[in-house]
């Protein structure tokens, strides 16, 4: 009967495939298990190579993927006793994957780590304290690293990682609409009013409400000495008079926007928006995809001082690693002058070594040099444990009311600061 | 395992028969029962290994503060209490429940009945039926990311196709009034392909004899649909209603991909809030407490459906 | 069921309208995959039109995609998982469903309802326990980690239970009288009767396994084990927009095999349906 024959075939196919899957599966199980199987390493005389598992963000194009692999291959070739095993993990599921791996005892030896997380992860004991290795015989020279970047790895006087890259946001402007970019708030507001054409041209593509907007806001606040928290990171201060002033100012700028123009896809690229705040990734985006766009980059206009955000990734080691010395040598290699430039390229950010940042590649490029300058004034995020929640749900929740609708900032911000403190008090 | 031959007589001894009970290996009911259990063994195994452990472990963790990297800290009922009462730690708890409820009410009717309508159209000896079915299926096989890119272009306030047809310039995804309905529209749109297939398969499983018998009794056209087709579709409707409700209450993908809960939390569904607590706030314990609260809600809705839907079992 | 001429016209009109609505976004994706990246951003219409207003088709995206993507390896892994899952789970699920629908045993209804419960828990939180089970079973970072947890799915059991319930019992009773055991009734009578739904489910199951990204990204690490969706993830979600044309080309290339696999099943259903009628 034809029917039962096809079904029998199907079952046979299933069995065959399971066998194939089984073969391909078990073959890979051993190496991927990583360092925890090294417990059975034989006696010291027979030197088996130490394996250092390294989790990196999956690069988003093949050239960068090859570059990342070449960094690892170069080390592996000249260091037969320490072998790096690279795993490129998609950014999208990075957090879940890393967390579950740590929970399940299969954490890598080293990995990228989003800068603001270092403090929390160090305090809770997840990260390896590398101070002794850094200051030891085969250690690093601290002044070879850009100070601010290195400091993001320091918690309670101890070092928990090495910086991998850093990034910031700056002001993009359309040169045809804005021949002279604004340097101060007053100039910024004047140009916004001048440039605005109802239904056609909007002045400034700024941050919306929610987490993203709240992450961007401190870049503007900083230009008016409005800070998110006090120096000791014990109090939240975004209701200060300077912050109130900043919100009022942003609302005034937003008066020169139309909703439909500003939310249209690629509005800035298509010449409908005069100014926008964004990061270095957009330089590449606009240069490549919008040949008719004549744009420039400048520092975010200041009221009292220049300022911006700082972000980036650090390279950290996990306490669960079995070979801290080998691991540290790898970390040193990955963050040397040559590789810091390569990682900057791979991640689209900027290098964290002093020598590398002085490279003409950055200093003579009309766009990148502005970002390097802006980095000098960049402010780190508050090192408060609950900050992300405060960012998303307390500050982010009121941004639209203050920036778009122009409601009175003082009472609203006072209320939100109270909530933030109550949250921190828990 | 040799099966006893069935005799022409009934499987079960008629009621009131002499109490000569056949030995167990000849008792048909015993075999039926054993076979029943055997057939569901893989499902039970799966349930025990993958799901029960997960549920129990998750339940335990909902009484702790846990960020996955460090050992869980017991806090008893605190997570649950805080979710219901602490408006500072969880300011959007009730709001997100409301958004999810709005979602279910808006999305479910469309997602269930629109595909039925299309399936009914197709169930008519159409020329090119295969072609139509393939076309309808295309949104189902297109990866979500591709659709997201296409929708962004179609919904663009200035040059988007939708605004072009309607002659408006509404910012569909950034306007608090329109964001959630827009996501619902996208979701229903995506559900047509899949739902249509399920309805069509169910319609085709109805043998023609049933309709012919009905026609003899005078039931044709609309009456045939109402009295013959619909009741036979009821089991399928029940399935779509129950599983659909379970899925809809948990919804988080559309808002995660397109709006992130914005604008102004108008698309912050309960599922998205839960996800944020896992991913962004490192608050696994709270997230699990939310999951179990959701479980109670969905369980209640499901049990109600079981109660009020007439079940055709033997 | 004869239809009048006007009815037929309305039906076709409706079908064409729905087809248009459902297919338009995909057409948009396909057409845009032929644009150069800058045209994609600056000329957001449907068709790739160059600066002189002429229609063109750029294959740069496809060439780039072919060079970039390790299609061979990823496709092989994906197919192994998808095909195994589809066939094995179809078997286990329908078997259980038949039992719940037709066989009598104590506690049947209660067991069924209990099985439904885990479906009501959002995936985000069952992720960690599943991961730990996978770890404990020793299948972490193998393709088994994708296969074993998908062998049973309660939603499908539910679906087929409903299907089996709606079948008239006559055929099954006849088979039983003829001496068939329950497995034979399930296999030779029950399954063929629900063939349309079976094919549908298998197609959907295949799709799910094919496109699944989130779960594989958690349980797989080694590049040799990557599936298609996993391998392409970095490209598809990247911030770098220079390769946008490759991205769209990749998406089209991912979907194409599915359409090609799908078309033959059209005829299968119709043939199977007719055969079922004759039996």
Image (cartoon, grey):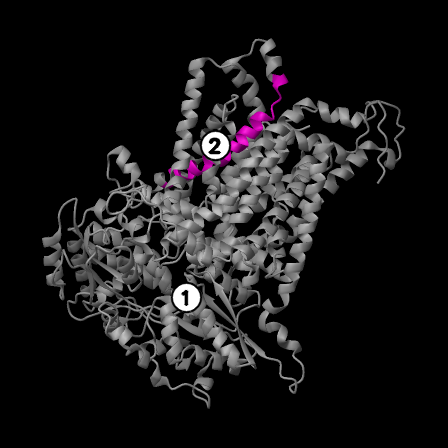
Name the residue that disc number 2 marks.
B112
Res. A301 image quadrant: bottom left
Is residue B83 in sight in this rendering?
A: no
Quarter of the C terminus of chain A within the rendering? bottom left
Q: Position of residue C42 (x, y in %)?
A: 26, 49
Q: Residue at x 68, y 22 (%)?
A: C278
Which residue is identified by label 1?
Answer: A64
- In the displayed structure image, the side of residue C95 where residue C215 appears, left or right: left
The picture places residue B268, in percent across and down from the top left corner, at 38, 48
A114 or C125: nearer the viewer: A114
- Quarter of the image where the N terminus of chain A is located: top right
Q: Which residue is depicted at the point 16% across and 49% down? A: A201
Q: Which residues are magenta?
A: B183-210
Within the magenta stretch, is there residue A250? no
- Within 10 Å of disc 1 (Cα), the crowding (few <14, some 14-19, many 20+) is some
Q: Secondary structure at mark 1?
A: helix
Q: Is residue B140 left or right of residue A218?
A: right
């Amino acid at each position: 009967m034809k029917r039962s024959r096809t079904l029998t075939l199907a079952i046979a196919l299933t069995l065959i495939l399971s066998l194939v899957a089984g073969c391909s599966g078990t073959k890979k199980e051993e190496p991927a298990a990583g360092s925890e199987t090294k417990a059975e390493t034989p006696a010291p005389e027979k030197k088996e190579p130490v394996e250092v598992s390294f989790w990196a963000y999956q690069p988003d194009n093949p050239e960068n993927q090859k570059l990342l692999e070449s960094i690892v291959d170069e080390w592996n070739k000249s260091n037969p006793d320490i072998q790096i095993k690279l795993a490129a993990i998609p950014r999208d599921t990075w957090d879940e994957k890393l967390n579950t791996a740590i929970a399940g005892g299969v954490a890598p030896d080293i990995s990228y780590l989003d800068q603001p997380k270092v403090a929390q992860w160090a305090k809770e004991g997840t990260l390896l304290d590398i101070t002794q290795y850094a200051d030891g015989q085969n250690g690093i020279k601290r002044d070879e690293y850009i100070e601010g970047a290195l400091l993001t790895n320091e918690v309670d006087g101890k070092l928990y990682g090495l910086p991998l890259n850093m990034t910031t946001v700056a002001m993009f402007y359309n040169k045809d609409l804005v021949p002279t970019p604004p340097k101060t708030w007053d100039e910024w507001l004047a140009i916004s009013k001048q440039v605005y054409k109802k239904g056609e041209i909007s002045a400034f593509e700024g941050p919306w409400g929610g987490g993203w907007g709240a992450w961007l806001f401190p870049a503007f606040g900083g230009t008016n000495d409005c800070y998110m928290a006090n120096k000791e990171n014990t109090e939240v201060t975004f209701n200060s008079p300077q912050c109130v002033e900043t919100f009022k100012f942003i609302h005034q700028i937003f008066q020169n926007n139309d909703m439909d123009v500003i939310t249209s896809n690629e509005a800035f690229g298509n010449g409908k928006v005069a100014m926008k705040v964004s990061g270095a990734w957009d330089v590449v985006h606009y240069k490549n995809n919008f040949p008719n766009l004549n744009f420039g980059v400048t520092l975010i206009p200041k009221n009292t001082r220049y300022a911006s955000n700082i972000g980036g990734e650090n390279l950290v080691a996990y306490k669960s690693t079995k070979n801290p010395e080998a691991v540290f040598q790898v970390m040193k290699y990955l963050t040397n002058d040559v590789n810091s430039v390569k990682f900057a390229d791979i991640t689209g950010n900027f290098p964290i070594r002093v020598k590398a940042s002085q490279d003409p590649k950055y200093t003579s490029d009309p766009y990148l040099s502005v970002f390097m300058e802006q980095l000098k004034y960049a402010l780190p995020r508050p090192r408060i444990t609950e900050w992300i929640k405060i960012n998303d749900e307390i500050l982010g929740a009121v941004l639209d009311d203050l920036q778009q609708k122009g409601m009175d900032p003082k009472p609203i911000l006072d209320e939100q600061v109270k909530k933030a403190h109550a949250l921190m008090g828990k | 395992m040799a099966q006893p031959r069935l005799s022409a007589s009934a499987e079960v001894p008629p009621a009131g028969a002499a109490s000569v009970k056949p030995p167990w290996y000849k008792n048909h009911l015993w075999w039926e029962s054993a076979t029943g259990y055997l057939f569901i063994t893989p499902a039970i195994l799966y349930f025990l290994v993958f799901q029960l452990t997960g549920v129990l472990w998750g339940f335990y963790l909902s009484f702790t503060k846990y960020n996955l990297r460090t050992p869980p800290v017991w806090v008893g009922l605190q997570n649950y209490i805080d979710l219901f009462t602490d408006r500072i730690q969880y300011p959007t708890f009730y709001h997100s429940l409301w958004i999810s409820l709005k979602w279910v009410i808006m999305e479910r009717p469309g997602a269930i009945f629109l595909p039925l309508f299309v399936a009914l159209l197709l169930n008519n000896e159409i020329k090119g039926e295969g072609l139509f079915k393939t076309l309808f299926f295309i949104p189902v096989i297109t990866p979500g990311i591709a659709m997201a890119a296409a929708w962004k272009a179609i919904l663009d306030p200035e040059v988007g196709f939708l605004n072009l047809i309607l002659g408006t310039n509404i910012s569909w995804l950034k306007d608090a009034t329109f964001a959630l309905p827009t996501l619902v529209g996208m979701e229903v749109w995506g559900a047509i392909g899949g739902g249509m297939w399920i309805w069509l398969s169910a319609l085709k499983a109805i043998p023609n004899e049933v309709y012919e018998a009905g026609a003899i009794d005078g039931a044709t056209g609309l009456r045939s649909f109402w009295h013959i087709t619909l009741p036979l579709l009821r089991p399928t409707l029940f399935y779509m209603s129950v599983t659909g409700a379970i899925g809809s209450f948990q919804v988080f993908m559309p808002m995660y991909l397109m709006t992130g809960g914005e604008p102004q939390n108008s698309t912050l569904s309960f599922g998205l809030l839960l996800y944020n607590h896992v991913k962004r706030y490192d608050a696994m314990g709270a997230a699990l407490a939310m999951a179990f609260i959701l479980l109670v809600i969905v369980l209640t809705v499901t049990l109600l459906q079981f109660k009020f839907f007439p079940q055709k079992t033997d | 069921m004869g239809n009048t001429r006007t009815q037929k016209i309305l039906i076709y009109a409706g079908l064409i309208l729905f087809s248009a609505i459902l297919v338009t976004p995909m057409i948009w994706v396909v057409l845009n995959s032929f644009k150069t990246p800058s045209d994609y951003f600056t000329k957001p219409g449907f068709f790739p039109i160059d600066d002189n207003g002429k229609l063109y088709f750029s294959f740069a995206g496809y060439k780039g995609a072919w060079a970039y993507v390790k299609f061979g390896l990823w496709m092989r892994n994906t197919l192994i998982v998808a095909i195994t899952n589809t066939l094995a789970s179809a078997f286990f699920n329908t078997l259980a469903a038949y039992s719940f629908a037709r066989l009598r045993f104590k506690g049947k209804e209660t067991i069924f309802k209990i099985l439904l419960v885990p479906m009501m828990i959002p995936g985000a939180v069952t992720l960690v326990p599943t991961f730990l089970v996978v770890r404990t079973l020793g299948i972490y970072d193998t393709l088994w980690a994708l296969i074993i947890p998908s062998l049973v799915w309660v939603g499908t059991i539910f679906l087929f239970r409903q299907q089996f319930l709606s079948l008239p019992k006559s055929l099954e009773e006849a088979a039983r009288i003829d001496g068939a055991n329950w497995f034979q009734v399930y296999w030779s009578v029950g399954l063929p009767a629900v063939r349309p739904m079976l094919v549908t489910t298998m197609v959907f199951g295949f799709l799910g396994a094919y496109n699944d990204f989130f779960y594989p990204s958690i349980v797989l690490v080694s590049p040799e084990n990557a599936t298609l969706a996993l391998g392409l993830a970095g490209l598809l979600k990247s911030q770098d927009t220079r390769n946008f044309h490759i991205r769209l080309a990749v998406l089209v290339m991912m979907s194409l095999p599915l359409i090609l696999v799908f078309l033959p099943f059209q005829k299968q259903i119709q043939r199977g349906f007719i055969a079922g009628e004759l039996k």
